[in-house]
Amino acid sequence: MTSQGLYHKIGVAMGIRIKDIADAVGVSSTTVSLVLNNKPGAGDELRMKILRAAKDLGYTGPRSAKAGSLCLLHIARHGHTINRDHDVFIADYIEGLSQGSKLAGYSLEIVMFKLAPMEQVLETALGKAADGFIVLGTELSREDIESFQVIRKPLVFIDTYHEFLNFDFVDMNNEDSVFLLLSHLYSMGHRSIGFVKGKIETRNIRLREMGFLAGLQKLGLEADKSFIFSVDQTFHGAYSDMKSILAQHPRLPTALICSNDIIASGCLRAFSKSGIRVPEDISIGGFDDLPLSAISDPPLTTIQVSKAQIGRMAIQLLVSRIQEETNMPAVKVLIGGRLIERNSVKRIDSPSEAEGDTA
C-alpha cells in the first residue's frame, strides 16, 4: 500500500480536518476553508488542487452547523465605557463576529452581563455548550481576565490586550494609532499638545495615553503634565467634567487628543458652552470614528478602528483553536487604525500660535 493510501485510510478512521488538507497541499487552513465554503481567495488551479486533495483524503465536510456554536460574552463591569453611548461601536464588533461565524459554519450566541460579578459570568460560561467563547474585554481588569482560566474551552478576548497572559487577544493597535493622530497634529504645526483620558482606566485608554507620551518623545516634544486632563467616559460625564475644568481657566495647549470620540464629543460641547472655539482657539482629535464624529460641530478628526476586521480575525483564531486542536502558544493580534481628517484641527503657521494659551 502506498503511503498516500495508508494516510487516506487512517484519515477516514480518525476524521480528516481542514488542517490535514492544508498540510497536504502546503497552504494555510484559512485558504482551504475559503475554497471548501466556495468563497473567493484562491485561484482556479489552487482551488482544484485543494478540492482534489480533500476528495483523496476522504474529507466528508465540516462539523455539523447544528453542533457548532460560539458564544460572545458581552461584559459591562462598571458601564463607564460599555454603555448606550458605545452601542454603535460594539455593534460593529458584533457584525464582524457574526460574519466570521457564519463563514466558518457556526452559530453565534450573544450573552450580555450588565454590572454582574465575575462569578456570575464564569458560572454562566461554564454552563454553556458552546465550542468556544469570544470575550469583550473592554472593561475587564487583568485579574478579571486571569479568572477565565477555569474555562477549559478555547477563548479569544477582543477590545483589550495584556502582556504576559496566556490567552489569545485581538485588539486595535492603540499606541501606533495614537501616533498617527499625534503626527498629524505635528504636521499641522502644533507643538503644544495635550491628552484627555477617562477617569476609570481601561487597558485601551491606558495604552493610548502611553502611546501619546511615547509619541511626544519621538517627535522631540516635551510632555506637560498640566495638559493631561481626566474626565468621565460618558458623553454627559465628559461634558460636565470638562466644563468644570474650563471654569478654572487653566492654561490650554493648542491641541487636545481625546481617548475616544465620546469623550471628544463631550469636550466639544464643553468648549462651545465656555466660549472656546474649535478649531480656531483649540484643535481636537478623537479615537474610534463613531458615526457621531462625522456630524459633530465641527466634524471630528479621529482614528478609524477596524472593528469588523477585529471581529472576523477573532473568529478565525477561535475556530482554528477548535477545529485544529492545536497547542500553539498564545496569539496576540494588533490591528492598526486609519486617520480620518475632518474640520476639528487647525493648521498653525506662526510660532506664537504653537505656544498654547489661557482659557
Image (cartoon, rainbow, N blue to C red):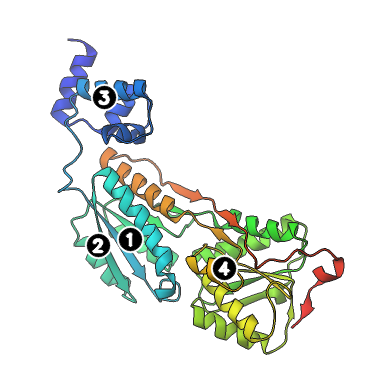
Q: Is residue 313 above or below residue 148?
A: above
| Residue linked to disc 4 | 259
* Label 3 Cα crowd, 10 Å radius (few <14 / some 14-19 / many 20+): some
Q: CA distance from mark 4 to mark 3?
A: 48 Å
x and y percentages locating residue 32 in the rendered image: 31, 31
CB under 8 Å between discs 3 and 2: no
Q: Which residue corresponds to mark 1?
A: 148
In the image, residue 178 lies at what x, y percent?
61, 59
Alpha carbon of mark 1 to alpha carbon of mark 3: how far?
A: 39 Å
Task: Report if the CB atoms under discs 1 and 2 are less than 8 Å apart.
Answer: yes
Viewer-proximal residue among 166 and 335: 335
Residue under pointer 2:
125
Q: Nearer the viewer, mark 2 or mark 4?
A: 4
Q: Which residue is mark 3?
A: 51
Percent position of residue 298, x then y:
62, 71
Residue lying at 16% horizontally and 43% vertically, measured from the top left? 64
Which amino acid, mark 3? Leu
Number of marks in the rendered image: 4
Front tag of 1 and 2: 2
The residue lying at 54 percent from left, 77 percent from top is 199
Residue 156 appearing in the image: no
Amino acid tagged 4: Ser
Residue type at mark 1 is Phe
Query: Which of the two discs, 4 and 3, labels the residue nearer the N terminus?
Result: 3
Label whose residue precedes the other's in the sequence (2 or 4) = 2
